[in-house]
């Protein structure tokens, strides 16, 4: 956790209402950090349903394995998240640690270990001492309350410079329901099915299979469309919990993904996921510029997406943005190497509303002064028109600065 907040951080923090059916508390267990909270424990009412998407990394953390194994039941009573240690690449010790953590949490929450979900973030390859949770989790249950959510977000931070929270309120069958979410992430960001760590809770009564479908669809244009450095974490975890408490106020239970009453909820969930995902990109390690990369005119949306990521993940593009250099040659390079259909002489490139390249060459009306002035802003939009079809995609990233190297050069120190 940095003491210097990213200049791209949101200018205000939303007022996060309580979500009926979930209580939580944070604690300092001394996992790695001193004098700061590093554990979050949430307790859910009986009947809470759960959904999750996780990293596709072939080297997943022990906590990811645990969550996958127990998600099929679709129910949750507790969540335990720790920062400072990812409990990844830790062999049998890692598996033993998650089992012990779940056992301690279950005893504290009065549920079965299989109803406890776990997530860890931090250093890879170092065993997690789960005995540090003894007493800590029981105390969390005693102190658990409906807020403040900002404390929950702070407890799961590692190199983040600000806590990431978002909330939405929407009608479900004429009854207001709340969706709250938190996330963490600043480096090792190139999600593949989820984000570094993110947890979303609603009081809507939604069956687990429906919840899973909502989440799987919602992640594609949000968390799976952000990148900081092109590296996918071993610990990527995004979970959605529905306590169902709004049913007591008359909200209808949703058992079918095609239920028309879900339309507003689905839209609000997508907005919340995008809000959190963009906050992750805005907190990229050492970032000074927030960058939106849009590719249009591709042969398909999938092709546009791959080209957009080729641009967004290019160190040469990202360092040019950091240097406030409108070097469209690097954009051409990234398009050309993506392995997707593209024709040089149809290519058009824009920085903001300024067209810098057209039909395979520098735009005849190119204005160096105007473009340089645009590149000095905090938010940069890069747009590429391939002129081949109707495929379009947008991904979000940040620039690459010396601070990124400094942060990651001594991460374990």
Image: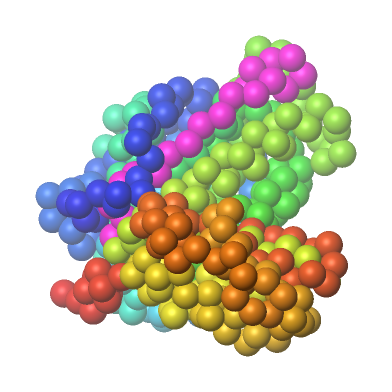
Figure quadrant of residue 83:
bottom left
Q: Position of residue 126 (x, y in %)?
A: 29, 76
Image quadrant in which the N terminus is located: bottom left
Image height check: is 351 above or below 133?
below
73 in relation to 351, above or below: above
> Viewer-proximal residue, 345 or 141?
345
Viewer-proximal residue among 7 and 29: 7
| Magenta run includes residue 165 | yes
Q: Is-magenta flag for residue 264? A: no
Where residue 299 sits, quadrant-wise, is bottom right
Q: Residue at x 45, y 43 (%)?
A: 182
Q: Main SS of the magenta segment? A: strand
As rendered, which of 119 and 9 lies closer to the eye? 9
Residue 66: x and y in percent read 53, 63
Tell me residue 234's x, y (percent).
Answer: 47, 72
Residue in view at x 69 percent, y 61 percent: 393
Residue at (58, 53) in percent of width and height: 353
- In the image, the segment drawn in magenta is 159-177
Q: Residue at x 52, y 43 (%)?
A: 275
Q: Residue 77 appears at what percent x and percent y?
A: 52, 40
195 or 281: nearer the eye? 281
Let me know if residue 159 appears in the view.
yes
Of the 4 image quadrants, the one containing the C terminus is bottom left
Q: Is residue 281 among the parts visible in the rendering?
A: no
**Residue closest to the far front:** 364
């Amino acid at each position: 956790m940095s003491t210097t907040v990213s200049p791209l951080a949101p200018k205000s923090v939303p007022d996060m209402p309580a979500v009926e059916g979930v209580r939580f508390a944070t604690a300092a267990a001394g996992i790695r950090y001193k004098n700061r909270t590093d554990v979050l424990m949430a307790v859910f009412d009986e009947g809470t349903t759960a959904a999750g998407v996780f990293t596709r990394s072939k080297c997943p953390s022990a906590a990811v394995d645990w969550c996958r194994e127990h998600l099929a039941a679709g129910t949750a009573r507790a969540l335990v998240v720790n920062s400072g240690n990812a409990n990844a690449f830790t062999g049998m010790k890692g598996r033993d640690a998650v089992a012990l953590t779940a056992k301690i949490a279950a005893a504290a929450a009065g549920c079965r270990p299989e109803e406890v979900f776990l997530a860890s973030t931090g250093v890879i390859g170092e065993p997690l001492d789960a005995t540090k949770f003894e007493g800590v989790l029981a105390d969390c249950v005693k102190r658990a309350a409906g807020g403040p959510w900002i404390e929950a977000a702070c407890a799961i931070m590692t190199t983040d410079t600000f806590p990431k929270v978002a909330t939405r309120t929407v009608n479900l069958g004429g009854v207001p329901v709340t969706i709250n979410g938190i996330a963490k992430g600043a480096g090792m960001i190139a999600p593949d099915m989820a984000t570094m760590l993110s947890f979303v809770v609603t009081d809507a009564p939604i069956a687990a299979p429906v919840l899973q479908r909502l989440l799987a669809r919602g992640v594609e244009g949000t968390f799976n469309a952000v990148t900081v450095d092109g590296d996918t974490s071993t610990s990527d975890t995004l979970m959605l919990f529905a306590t169902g408490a709004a049913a007591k106020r008359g909200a209808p239970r949703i058992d079918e993904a095609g239920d028309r009453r879900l339309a507003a909820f689905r839209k609000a969930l997508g907005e919340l996921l995008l809000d959190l995902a963009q906050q992750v990109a805005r907190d990229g390690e050492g970032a000074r510029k927030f960058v939106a990369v849009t590719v249009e005119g591709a042969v398909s949306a999938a092709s546009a997406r791959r080209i957009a990521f080729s641009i967004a993940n290019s160190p040469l593009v990202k360092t040019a943005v950091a240097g406030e250099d409108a070097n469209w040659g690097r954009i051409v390079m990234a398009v050309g190497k993506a392995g997707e259909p593209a024709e040089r002489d149809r290519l058009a490139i824009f920085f903001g509303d300024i067209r810098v390249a057209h039909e395979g060459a520098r735009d005849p009306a190119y204005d160096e002064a105007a473009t340089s002035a645009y590149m000095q802003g905090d938010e940069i939009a890069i747009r590429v028109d391939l002129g081949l079809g109707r495929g379009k995609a947008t991904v979000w990233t940040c620039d690459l600065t010396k601070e990124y190297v400094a942060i990651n050069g001594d991460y374990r120190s």
